[in-house]
Image: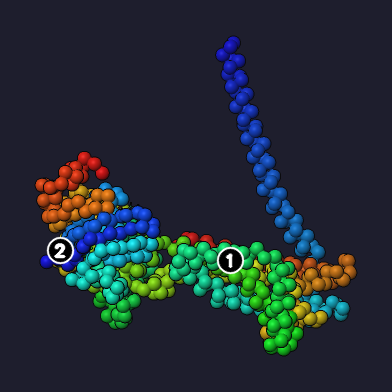
Amino acid sequence: MSKIEVCGLNVYYENGTVHALKEVNLEIETNKITALIGPSGCGKTTFLRALNRMNEVNDVMTKGKVFLDGKDIYNGGEDVIQLRKKVGMVFQQPNPFPMSIYDNVAYGPRIHGTRNKKLDSVVEESLKKAALWDEVHDRLEKNALKFSGGQQQRLCIARALAVNPEVILFDEPCSALDPISTARVEDLLRALKKDYTIVIVTHNMQQAARVSDFTAFFLLGEMIECGRTTQIFEKPKDKRTEDYVTGRFG
Amino acid sequence: MYLLERVRTFRSRRMDSGTEEKIVEKLLFIAALSSTLIVFFIIAFMFKEGIPALALGWDFFFGMIWRPSHNQYGIVPLVVCTFIVGIGALVIAAVIGIPAAIFLAEYAPAWLRNIIKPCVELLVGIPSIVLGFFGLIVIVTYIRDSFGGYGECILAGWIILAIMTLPHVISISEDSIRAVPKGYKEGSLALGATQLQTIKKVILPNARSGILAAMVLGMGNAIGETMAVLMVIGNPEIPFIPSSILDPVRVLTSTIVIEIPYAVWGSLHQQALFALGVVLFIVVAILNLITTAVVRKGAMR
Ligand SMILES: Nc1ncnc2c1ncn2[C@@H]1O[C@H](COP(=O)(O)OP(=O)(O)OP(=O)(O)O)[C@@H](O)[C@H]1O
Ligand SMILES: [Mg+2]
């Protein structure tokens, strides 16, 4: 079953002069990990940010439809706040707020009106899901910026989990991390799959192959090919996909 | 022999560039030193001239009456008025300037920003005498006609000084709002926060030190400002602590300007005016130190 269905998505930057995504169609399966791969500048981030309307923070024009559970998120009536609550995001650079671990995780629930009493358990649960609880449970009041990059990134995952999303978007979540932290985040992704639908942008072919169920290959703003990860990596249909996954370009 | 010659010329050429370097370094040092010396010279001079008045001690610093004709040099009313005028102007500038900065940095579309920004910057370029003149003709008249009294008063001073500090408050605040890392803002929005929640909970707390610095700096400017204020605040013969914002007042700067012409050369009166200069200098210097400290603390985080 597909959680998200993207139909004829076009995104333009710079008053329409930069056509960053061209007629992209893609389905994203529920409780699976979908990896987006492709050379730099092909539009992966733009695609990802179209899924929770984060592109709107910049000056962009979006055309096409993106259905979340069958409802078009770009159809005027949809509430962007509710959308972003349902579709969380983890960024390339760990970006915890300069406040305590606790306040970071509690940030989302607080703005959505969770009361102080329930907050403690939400924070604990989210940190546990993000596999960070054991490391930080006795330092919840410490400033988040004092922790390592890998811990910060898991904190950002916990922060996203705390608002109880259904989909989580990861934009190259490991590119700023060392191999050990990367392995932990990958383990985490596999564990989260059970409860969440995950979309991950990655530059790392092995990572896509290791963690994802489905893979979509982007090139110059177009979605060239998508399918089961094993198929994309072992029997790509398109020559360009084959060249890319075998490392012949990009 | 030939080789030796080569080595020698090579050596001397190196020596040349070495001495040149040393000379340039010395010149740069002298330039740097001269500005420092000038500052020290002025400060030393001010203190030296002011000392006899400063030496009045309690009667000077805590005296309630400033009346040179009776040899009374108590600065309390002047200092109090200076702060009343400075702080009030700053509050007005902050109440208008901070929201304006938030609007410019977070809400305004590019075209609108391109209109507002240059206008704000143009405000800086208006000579203070022109502003004072405007204040005297327009604001003072308006206040006199609608509220009564002299018209020349604290309120007029507030308005004029607020106009003068506004552009600084707006541009420094806007810069510090823009300097908040994009990741914080996007992180907040991505969690489903509204723009307003994001501004309140993430952007303003992180821009706080910059905005505070803008305030303190604005305060320093307001207190040191002379011409425009002088023209609109009334400057009563005997300064007093005001009881209404429609009262005329005297501040440190305006007192110096007004009394210098008839202070007898070398008299205690003249020395007292220098002492006022010292007080003004110390107040502004402290405000600048606070600004630097606030900015540095903000940068460290
Ligand atoms: N804010 C923006 N303004 C203008 N053009 C942009 C903007 N963001 C992206 N683009 C352009 O859109 C295209 C797609 O960019 P995008 O960031 O989506 O690529 P990407 O696949 O994520 O690349 P990378 O792997 O380097 O992160 C690029 O050509 C880029 O120059
Ligand atoms: Mg990207």
Instruction: Please tell me whether residue A61 is drawn above or below residue A124 in the rendered image.
Output: above
Question: Would you call the spot at circle 1 few (<14 residues within 10 Å), some (14-19), or many (20 or more)?
Answer: few
Quarter in which the C terminus of chain A is drawn? top left
Query: Callout 1: helix, strand or loop?
Result: helix
Residue at 72 percent across and 82 percent down: it is B141
Residue B229: x %, y % from top left: 71, 73
Under mark 2, the amino acid is Glu
Counting labels gives 2
Query: Callout 2: helix, strand or loop?
Result: strand
Instruction: Please tell me whether residue A103 is drawn above or below residue B20 in the rendered image.
Output: below
Q: Chain of mark 1?
A: B
Q: Nearer the viewer, residue B99 or B200?
A: B99
Residue B88: x %, y % from top left: 63, 78
The image quarter containing residue A16 is bottom left
Q: Residue furthest right?
A: B264
Residue B251: x %, y % from top left: 73, 75
In the displayed structure, does residue B173 sit left or right of residue B202?
right
Residue at 13 percent across and 47 percent down: it is A236
Residue B175: x %, y % from top left: 51, 63
Real-space Cα separation, disc 1 to disc 2, in angstroms: 53 Å
Quadrant for ligand 1? bottom left
Name the disc covering residue A44, or none: none
Q: Which residue is identified by label 1?
A: B119
Question: Would you call the spot at circle 2 few (<14 residues within 10 Å), some (14-19), or many (20 or more)?
Answer: some
In the displayed structure, does residue B212 sit left or right of residue A19?
right
Name the disc covering residue A29, or none: 2
Quarter in which the N terminus of chain A is drawn? bottom left
